[in-house]
Image: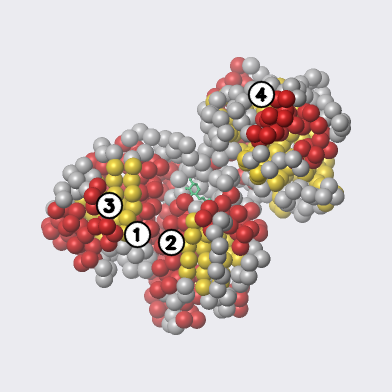
């Protein structure tokens, strides 16, 4: 998704701007650009290009550029195709601007500006802002004042960073619905759409609040709130970024899938004490009052929430509703007393999840809890209780290792809440033992890499696939289908196995791979009937199952079987999660897709 970095310094800032852009690449983008001003410049100097930041770097190497103050952007197209004209920064005379978010009323504003004689060079919604600021500067010479006046006319959500060659010492930045963070450094200050882009640039970060406008110069930062009153926002220390190396892998996605055991260890560290879960001890009194759970999340985080719904209901005996955040925000809720509102988000910045959170605030929930992997991101900062997943940076657009960390975190919460509903200490000790065994069992799944690769070859030659599972394995089937779509562009669907006969079975023939998740649980005989129905119609079965069942299922169904280590029934969905991600990864490798940046997708989805 779009990323912003801006630096106000005293020497040439082009190189650090490019490093900042490289740190934003993980968000997913289709074009990049930067604009700088120096004290001698009549207009901002700008370079833009479609594609990778390295193409922009190459452009800069051949046709140098320098300036002391500058802004840069990675763009993920919303309005207008990925093209150089639509890439940011957008320029109007002396003004250059980068924008994250969406301007909903851009059409009438564009007509008004065209009538006033402005010529548009892009199809973006963003270009109206830069022309409006240019126009406003006829009425005032003060850049911050002009930006403040223009912001009042914009509808939608946005983060802006603006420079002007008439005022070449500073950047003016505004947060309204899309996050922005300031970096305080030595003789240089900066602004970015997320704190990770500030690594190496600043020692402290200052998070802007909604409606804040900041003026950032090399030696000073001034912030005004939404009413134009000067405010101070407390700085927080910025940890130096963890460098992520690909090592033996071609893609971050592979490295991250093979990091599942480490991410499970990391989320468990300091959260268990002997045979009991201690992760939520500080909130014991509050959590004792919980009578229900409502979870809002997107993408794979939402699917993790759907798995956890089974744990909250089965282990803790508490009603749980997991909901896609973009649906939650526009739906009327009936909130039962003492309901815990939980958001789950790798990035902590997903726009729909943030909007669902904001809607939930003040609606009578008992408390808000966020589980998140990105330190200093918006959701944990806003929530009453924050639970960091600690899985380390996740670079690939498709979430993998953080999903297993999320599942473990949710299970820790379910176990904590279950105590009140009769979870005995011996049962808790049994589940803690299952959690402690998990990293090693996941490692064993990963050691079967060659089995997954072998089955992936056949699936890679097809254009469609179905994933099926029951109960907590149904959302894992959905995750398998989601990952296969993202990583291989094969059309895939996930279904509850019992629903096949109500429609999806019509799709099954000899060209339809069906990947079945078949744990050795009390529903296995029901699932086997579903598998026989598929076999009878010529479907190509790929059965992922527990070791103890593998040979029997292979003999009876005469199909491809991938065995997973036998594990505890409660933690089994986590092993199956890893297996479907690994399978999808191999299919993607065979189809030669870009596993880290699937087409059209972004990581930190900061627009609605
Ligand atoms: C994007 C990513 C997905 C991720 C989803 C939710 O769509 O591509 O992999 O699951 O956002 O992200 P979050 O950061 O809120 O977990």
* Residue 181 picture location, percent across and down: 69, 46
Callout 1–callout 2 Cβ contact below 8 Å: yes
**Residue at image point 77% right, 37% down:** 150
Q: Is residue 423 above or below residue 387?
A: below
Percent x, y of residue 326: 53, 53
Tell me the crowding category of disc 4: few under 14, some 14 to 19, or many 20 or more residues within 10 angstroms, Cα based: some
- Among the two numbered marks 2 and 4 on one chain, the one whose residue lies closer to the N terminus: 4
- Nearer to the camera, 84 or 346: 84
94 left or right of 267 in image: right
In the structure shown, which secondary structural element does the residue marked by tag 1 occupy?
A: helix
Q: Which of the pair 82/386 is nearer the observer?
A: 82
Q: Earlier in the sequence, mark 4 or mark 3?
A: 4
Which sits earlier in the primary sequence, circle 3 or circle 1?
A: 1
Name the residue beneath numbered marker 1: 474
Q: Residues within 10 Å of mark 3 (few under 14, many from 20)?
A: some
How far apart marks 4 and 3 lie (CA) works out to 48 Å
User: Which residue is drawn at the image coordinates 81% and 52% (left, top)?
Assistant: 232
Please give the residue where the numbered disc 2 appears in the rendered image: 306
The nearer-to-camera label among 3 and 1 is: 3
Label 1 crowd bin: few (<14), some (14–19), many (20+), radius 10 Å:
many
2 or 3: tag closer to the N-terminus: 2
Q: CA distance from mark 2 to mark 3?
A: 21 Å
Q: Which mark is residue 120?
A: 4
- From the viewer's perspective, is 22 left or right of 423? right
Q: Nearer the viewer, residue 284 or 600?
A: 600
Inter-mark Cα distance, 4 to 1 = 49 Å
Residue 343's place in the image compared with 70, above or below, is below
Residue appearing at x 18%, y 57% in the figure: 533
Rendered view: 124 above or below 465? above
**Disc 3 versus disc 1: distance between alpha carbons?**
14 Å
Location of residue 116 with respect to 175 vertically, above or below: above
Q: Position of residue 32 (x, y in %)?
A: 59, 29
């Amino acid at each position: 998704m779009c990323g912003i970095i801006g630096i106000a310094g005293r020497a040439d800032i082009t190189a650090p701007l490019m490093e900042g852009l490289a740190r934003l690449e993980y968000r997913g983008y289709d074009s990049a650009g930067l604009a700088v001003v120096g004290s001698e410049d009549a207009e901002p100097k700008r370079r833009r290009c479609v594609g990778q930041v390295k193409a922009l770097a190459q452009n800069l190497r051949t046709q140098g550029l320098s300036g002391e103050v500058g802004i840069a952007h990675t763009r993920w197209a919303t309005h207008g195709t990925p093209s150089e004209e639509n890439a940011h920064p957008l320029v109007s005379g002396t003004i250059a601007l980068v924008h994250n978010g969406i301007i909903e009323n851009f059409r009438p504003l564009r007509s008004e500006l065209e009538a006033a004689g402005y010529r548009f060079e892009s199809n973006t919604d963003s270009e109206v802002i830069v022309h409006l600021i240019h126009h406003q500067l006829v009425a005032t010479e003060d850049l911050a004042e002009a930006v403040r006046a223009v912001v009042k006319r914009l509808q939608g959500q946005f983060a802006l960073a603006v420079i002007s060659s008439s005022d070449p010492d500073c950047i003016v930045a505004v947060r309204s619905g899309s996050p922005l963070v300031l970096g305080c450094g030595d003789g240089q200050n900066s602004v970015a759409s997320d704190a990770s882009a500030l690594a190496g640039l600043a020692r402290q970060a200052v998070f802007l609040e909604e409606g804040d406008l900041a003026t950032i110069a090399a030696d000073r930062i001034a912030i005004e709130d939404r009413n134009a009153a000067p405010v101070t926002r407390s700085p927080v220390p910025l940890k130096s970024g963890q460098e992520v190396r690909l090592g033996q892998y071609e893609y971050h996605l592979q490295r991250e899938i093979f990091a599942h055991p480490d991410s499970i260890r990391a989320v468990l560290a300091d959260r268990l004490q002997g045979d009991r879960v201690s992760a939520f001890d500080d909130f014991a009194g509050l959590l004792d009052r919980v009578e229900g759970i409502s979870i809002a999340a997107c993408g794979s985080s939402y699917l993790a929430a759907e798995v956890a719904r089974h744990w909250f209901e089965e282990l803790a005996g508490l009603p749980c509703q997991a909901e896609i955040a973009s649906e939650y925000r526009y739906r009327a809720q009936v909130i039962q007393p003492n309901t815990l509102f939980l958001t789950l988000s790798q990035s902590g910045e997903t726009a729909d999840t943030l909007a669902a959170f904001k809607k939930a605030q003040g609606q009578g929930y008992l408390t808000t809890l966020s589980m998140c992997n990105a330190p200093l991101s918006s959701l944990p900062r806003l929530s009453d209780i924050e639970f960091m997943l600690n899985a380390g940076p996740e670079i690939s657009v498709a979430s993998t290792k953080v999903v297993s960390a999320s599942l473990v975190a949710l299970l820790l919460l379910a176990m904590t809440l279950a105590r009140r509903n009769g979870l005995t200490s011996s049962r808790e000790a049994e589940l803690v033992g299952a959690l402690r065994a998990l990293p090693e069992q996941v490692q064993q799944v990963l050691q079967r890499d060659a089995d997954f690769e072998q089955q992936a070859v056949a699936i890679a030659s097809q254009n469609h696939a179905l994933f099926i599972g029951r109960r907590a394995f149904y959302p894992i089937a959905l995750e398998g289908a989601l990952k296969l779509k993202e990583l291989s562009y094969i059309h895939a669907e996930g279904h509850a196995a019992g629903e096949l006969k109500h429609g999806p079975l019509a799709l099954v023939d000899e060209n339809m791979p069906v990947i079945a998740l078949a744990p050795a649980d009390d529903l296995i005989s029901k699932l086997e009937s579903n598998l026989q129905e598929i076999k009878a119609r010529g479907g190509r079965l790929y059965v992922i199952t527990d070791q103890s069942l593998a040979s029997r299922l292979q003999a009876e169904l005469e199909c491809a079987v991938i065995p997973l280590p036998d594990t505890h029934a409660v933690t089994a969905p986590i092993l199956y999660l890893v297996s479907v991600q690994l399978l999808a990864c191999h299919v993607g490798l065979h189809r030669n897709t870009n596993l880290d940046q699937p087409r059209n997708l972004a990581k930190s989805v900061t627009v609605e």
